[in-house]
Image (spheres, coloured by chain):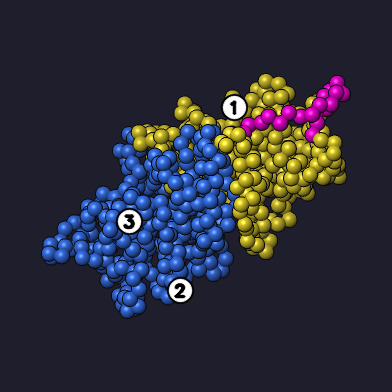
Chain colours: A yellow, B blue
Amino acid sequence: MLVKDLGEFNLIERFKKRIKLDSSVFLGSGDDCAVLKFDKKRFQLFTCDMIIEGVDFTHKDDPYFIGRKAVAASISDIASCLGTPTYCLVSLGMPKNTSLKFTDRLFKGMRDICREYKINIVGGDISSSRKIVVDVSMLGLVKKDNLVLRNGAKPGDLIFTTGESGGSILGKHLNFTPRINEARFLADNFKVNAMIDISDGLAQDLNHILRQSKAGALLYEGLIPKSPKARNLADALTSGEEFELLFTLNSVEAKRLLKKRIVNFKLIGEIVEKKYGFKLVYNSGRIKDINLKGFTHF
Amino acid sequence: MLVKDLGEFNLIERFKKRIKLDSSVFLGSGDDCAVLKFDKKRFQLFTCDMIIEGVDFTHKDDPYFIGRKAVAASISDIASCLGTPTYCLVSLGMPKNTSLKFTDRLFKGMRDICREYKINIVGGDISSSRKIVVDVSMLGLVKKDNLVLRNGAKPGDLIFTTGESGGSILGKHLNFTPRINEARFLADNFKVNAMIDISDGLAQDLNHILRQSKAGALLYEGLIPKSPKARNLADALTSGEEFELLFTLNSVEAKRLLKKRIVNFKLIGEIVEKKYGFKLVYNSGRIKDINLKGFTHF
């Protein structure tokens, strides 16, 4: 049996089952970040993201945005738990004949986004490699009261995203803005029940929330914010690496948020009981099961 | 200009110079681990090691030991600062047609060594990749009083290693024992002035200590512990990935250690003033400058 037969998510489950964690771990794998005991008021968040030439970018992409993406993907994971990023390490594999011009640009992309979000690059590892590989591991902090995971969605919650989806592969996947500011605003003003960032695709990532929250959902065709680059609705629902936040609020909190008329937050649907499944309500009134084909590695 | 023209260490320096760190960072890149403020009595250590098929191992190697090596290399970094490893994340890139048998063995290698040293695997990232890549990022803790860096060696210090060097490529690089127990013993009983683990080669790594401590050293041919697999003295001095600890103690502490007659610790030379350089004293009495050709990636 090959890893492609099992699939990415099953492979992660397979590994996860074999790990025993001690009591200092609040949450191990299975969410956007690991959550570790830190001090009385805060948890430490710990996450990593690996990007590889030919899968996540091509040699023709501007190395500035390759570096930026590697860091931004981890920032987005920290944002998904409503945390603040603090430190990162960078592991970099590249061919011996890589130009200094390339590595300087790549590094500048990392450094600039780290400066923007006040993250310290505290070290790393450099290896020779046939293909370019960048793995960023990042630490963050989150107030215990603010921590949000994938498992807290409840029937009656409304579902929001922070922006448009679809067509990320045409450019956004390399120069997206990790939603730290939106996360900060929500952490300071709202009680968020569940949250994830859209890396596998809106439908697939919402499904992660549904599975872990043991809930169902209805999405409304007319509410899904499609990027101008989205080919169609299906693309908006399945396009990976959009890095928007996807979250749920109970109805009271949701009304408070909607009243503020902030364009960054888009209502797209509602959480329902599990027995109702995961469905899309078309403008015509027709209701259909949602196709979960998002981006998976295997 | 290409990265191979600049070389690994200069490339790291080039990046390092361009980073600004805030005051919560006790030490950024340039040592075995980053050292971060944690609580009143302890620092947090943060390190990563990336290993890549065709560079650090081959597809024919037992995947158990590939997984083990990836984790053990980071444990060794934590040991080099006299810390205790706590948590790790694993980023794994592999081809879609990798067998589950392979990944299970790889994962078992990681899990077993983590259990042995009571490290929690708290998550990771899985990507498709043409070559197998494993990057482990690890956290640890060290008492502030115990923290040891590369920059504390002083003339008059004696130099020790925890074991034999040479011929690591013939097997040890995949199944070495990270020297956590030795580090614990030293932390509990001795004041260590400088320490590093041997990843680039004994001479090269001692040179890292000398450069950062602004000191010189004399090594004694008759004292260098050669592995049975070492081709010759030069191999014992330049073989990378031995993962022994290399450290210095002042003369009083060194005498205390020598009196204990512990076979794990081998005296190999002494720290001298910088003006005397870095030299090897042959059994014949001849003295020669040490050749710094160790393992470098570029």
Q: In the rendered structure, the residue with mark 2 lies on which chain?
A: B
Residue B282: x and y in percent read: 16, 62
Pointer 1 residue: A169
Locate the N terminus of chain B and report the quarter of the image it occupies.
Answer: top left
Closer mark to the observer between disc 2 and disc 1: 2
Pointer 3 residue: B205
Q: Is residue A90 left or right of residue B238?
A: right
Residue A237: x and y in percent read: 71, 29
Residue B13 seen by the camera = yes
Inspect the image, locate mark 2, and give the three-letter code of the amino acid beneath it. Asp
Q: Is residue A149 left or right of residue A241?
A: right
Q: Secondary structure at mark 2?
A: helix
Q: Earlier in the sequence, mark 2 or mark 3?
A: 2
Inspect the image, locate mark 1, and give the three-letter code of the amino acid beneath it. Ile
Q: Are marks 2 and 3 on the same chain?
A: yes
What is the C-alpha distance between the residues marked 2 and 1?
A: 54 Å
Pointer 2 residue: B188
Q: In the rendered structure, the residue with mark 3 lies on which chain?
A: B
Q: Residue at x 37, y 47 (%)?
A: B13
Residue B143: x and y in percent read: 50, 68
Residue A268, placed above or below residue B195: above
Classify 10 Å Cα crowding around label 1: few (below 14), some (14-19), many (20 and above). some
Residue B92: x and y in percent read: 52, 43
What is the C-alpha distance between the residues marked 2 and 3?
A: 24 Å
Q: Is residue B187 left or right of residue A182?
A: left
Using the image, tell me which numbered label, if any, was put on residue B125. Answer: none
Q: In the rendered structure, the residue with mark 1 lies on which chain?
A: A
Q: Quadrant of residue A170?
A: top right
- The magenta-colored residue range is A278-298
